[in-house]
Amino acid sequence: MLKGIPKILSPQLLKVLCEMGHGDRIVLADGNFPAESMGKDAIVVRMDGHGMVELLDAVLQLFPLDTYVEQPVQLMEVVPGDKVETPIWESYRRIIEKYDERGENAIGYMERFRFYEEAKKCYAIVATGEGALYANLILQKGTIS
């Protein structure tokens, strides 16, 4: 155990977050995301049983968002015609506002299949047990000043 580290962050995930450098990206994936097939060239961290809201809050306590890009947080857009509500996005917005002065302006939206292609290029994918639909996001790491 370490002091000041959120308990949800496993040793494997802490190692991944520490290994990542400026500009590296990580996917926080909901339970429906094809983490293993998308993560063939990435590190896949299993966090089954955990939700995205608690995980995002814990990660952003340690992980600086990139200030050299306009939107270092990317959400997967709802597919046109899909009648899905995304209340989890409001929780994400509140968490991001706690850790980044840009608030919701740090958040961008990416078409589903483009999101998949970008996920394949990420350093790591964290597979959670989140049940909310369209709860996936990509975070781009910044620097500590």
Image: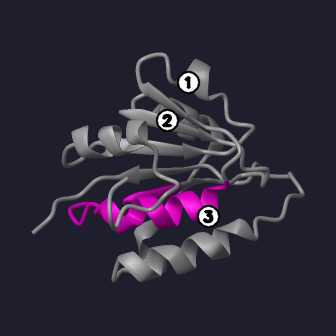
How many C-alpha atoms fall within 10 Å of the one at disc 2: few (<14), some, or many (≥20)?
A: many
Residues at marks 2 and 1, CA–CA distance in whole angstroms: 8 Å
Identity of the amino acid at label 1? Met
Residue under circle 2?
Answer: 125
Q: Is residue 68 magenta?
A: yes
The correct choice, above or below, for 99 with respect to 86 in the image is below
Alpha carbon separation for disc pair 1 and 3:
22 Å
Q: Is residue 117 left or right of residue 113?
A: left
Marks 3 and 2 close (CB-CB < 8 Å): no
The amino acid at mark 2 is: Ile
Residue at point 73%, 54% (across, down): 78
Q: Which residues are magenta?
A: 51-74
Callout 3 secondary element: helix
Q: Are marks 2 and 1 in contact (CB under 8 Å)?
A: yes
Judge whether residue 108 can be spotted in this image: no
* Above-or-below relation of 96 to 14: below
* Few, some or many residues within 10 Å of mark 1 (<14, 14–19, 20+): some
Q: Within the magenta stretch, is there residue 48?
A: no
Front-lying residue, 67 or 127: 127
Quadrant hosting residue 143? bottom left
Indicate the colouring scheme: one colour
- Closer to the chain start, of discs 3 and 2, is 3
Q: Secondary structure at mark 2?
A: strand
Q: Nearer the viewer, mark 2 or mark 1?
A: 2
Q: Which residue is mark 3?
A: 53
- Lower sequence index among marks 1 and 3: 1
Q: Where residue 7 appears, x then y in whole percent?
A: 49, 58
* Mark nearer the N terminus (2 vs 1): 1
Q: Label 1: which residue?
A: 38
Q: Where's the C terminus, which quadrant?
A: bottom left
Q: Quadrant of residue 90?
A: bottom right
Residue 3 at least partly seen:
yes
